[in-house]
Structure formats: structure tokens, C-alpha cells
Image (cartoon, rainbow, N blue to C red):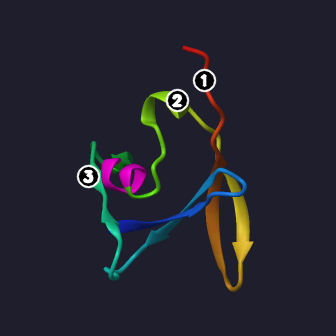
Amino acid sequence: MVGVKLMYDKAKNAVGFRFLKQKEDGMIGLKRLGKDSAYINAKAFLGMYDIEYKKFSNRYLPKEVNSGDKKILVIELKETMK
């Protein structure tokens, strides 16, 4: 995988991730943390949708959802008590 396409549903306060094997416009590149691990820098995405990082920072378990002929992973953001 070379990157991820992020989507945001404001009504559901949910973020969708579609992992990509080839480069596409609008994708965010993956940064490798070894052989089996990677991360993304999503600050620009959060800013674009006015999502407050501190308000929703947490670990989330994504759900796999069918989107047409593709599968995406979705996390529903929940406010953290800080």
C-alpha cells in the first residue's frame, strides 16, 4: 500500500479510510514504521473539516464497510473527556 484516501461524514461524525495500492490525487502517503506498520499525518485533513484533535483524540477500532465495489474502514469519532 502506498497511501490512504480519507473521507469525512459530518452528520455521523465518522472518518472513512480507503487504502490504496497505487497513487491517486488527494491521497495521503503512508509513513513506514517497520515491515508491518505504518502511519499517516492527518493534521491537514483535520483542519480542512474543522475537527478538533484534542476533543476526539483516542484509539478507535474501525468497522469495515462496503462502498460500491470497494471496502473502506470507518471510525465514528467520540468526544473524549479531558
Q: Amino acid at mark 2?
A: Lys
Dot 3 crowding, Cα within 10 Å, few <14, some 14–19, many 20+: few
Residue drawn 60% across and 23% down?
80
Do the CB atoms of the residues marked 2 and 1 lie less than 8 Å apart?
A: yes
Q: Is residue 56 above or below residue 38?
A: above
Dot 1 crowding, Cα within 10 Å, few <14, some 14–19, many 20+: few
Residue 1 can be seen in this image: no
| Location of mark 1 (residue) | 80
Does 9 sit left or right of 42 as displayed?
Answer: right
Q: Secondary structure at mark 3?
A: strand
Q: Amino acid at mark 1?
A: Thr
Q: Secondary structure at mark 1?
A: loop
> What number is the disc on residue 46?
none
The quarter of the picture where the C terminus appears is: top right
> What number is the disc on residue 55?
2
Q: Is residue 62 above or below residue 78?
A: below
Q: Nearer the viewer, residue 14 or 20?
A: 14
Between discs 2 and 3, the one toward the N terminus = 3
Q: Secondary structure at mark 2?
A: helix
- Part of the protein shown in magenta: 43-47
- Secondary structure mostly taken by the magenta-highlighted segment of the chain: helix
The quarter of the picture where the N terminus appears is: bottom left
Q: Position of residue 22 (x, y in %)?
A: 35, 80
